[in-house]
Amino acid sequence: MKMTDYVREWDNDNRLWVYEHRTVIENYLGRSLYSDEHIHHIDENPKNNSLSNLDIVSKSEHCRIHKPALKNRLCSIENCDVKHHSKGYCKKHYARMFRKGQGW
């Protein structure tokens, strides 16, 4: 999902755009969301902002929900069967790519 897929509303009082799903949860809770609280769309439809479709999760939990395969992913370099370390590379290839300034 891209950020542009989410429904936004203009907040004239604060002169900024706010995401509707955050507003729905904040109105339900009666408070603002904390910075470490993320909203997960259970059906993964960013336009479905019904309360029953929204869940408050931590950033790490949200990543686990949307990227469950990252834990067991291997290095993306051909013929390298080592577990990935960062950005899809094992520690050895990550260090080489970073040193050469490639890939970023």
Image (cartoon, rainbow, N blue to C red):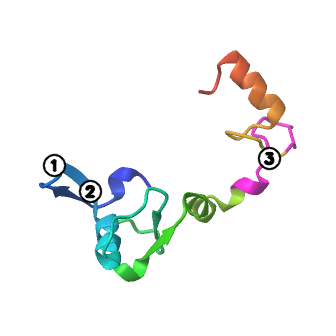
Q: Which mark is residue 18?
A: 2
Q: From the viewer's side, name the closer residue of 56 and 95.
A: 56
Q: Which residue is mark 3?
A: 74
- Does dot 1 land on a helix, a strand or a loop? loop
Examine the image and state in which quarter residue 100 appears: top right
Q: Position of residue 37 (x, y in %)?
A: 47, 62
Q: Position of residue 18 (x, y in %)?
A: 26, 56
Q: Which residues are magenta?
A: 70-82
Q: Are marks 1 and 3 in contact (CB under 8 Å)?
A: no
Q: Residue at x 30, y 75 (%)?
A: 30
Q: Which residue is mark 1?
A: 15
Q: In the rendered structure, which amino acid carries the disc numbered 3?
A: Leu
Q: From the viewer's side, name the closer residue of 78 and 56.
A: 56
Q: Residue at x 71, y 41 (%)?
A: 88
CA separation in Å, label 2 and label 1: 10 Å
Q: In the rendered structure, which amino acid carries the disc numbered 2?
A: Val
Locate the C terminus by quadrant: top right
Magenta stretch, overall SS? loop
Q: Position of residue 10 (x, y in %)?
A: 17, 55
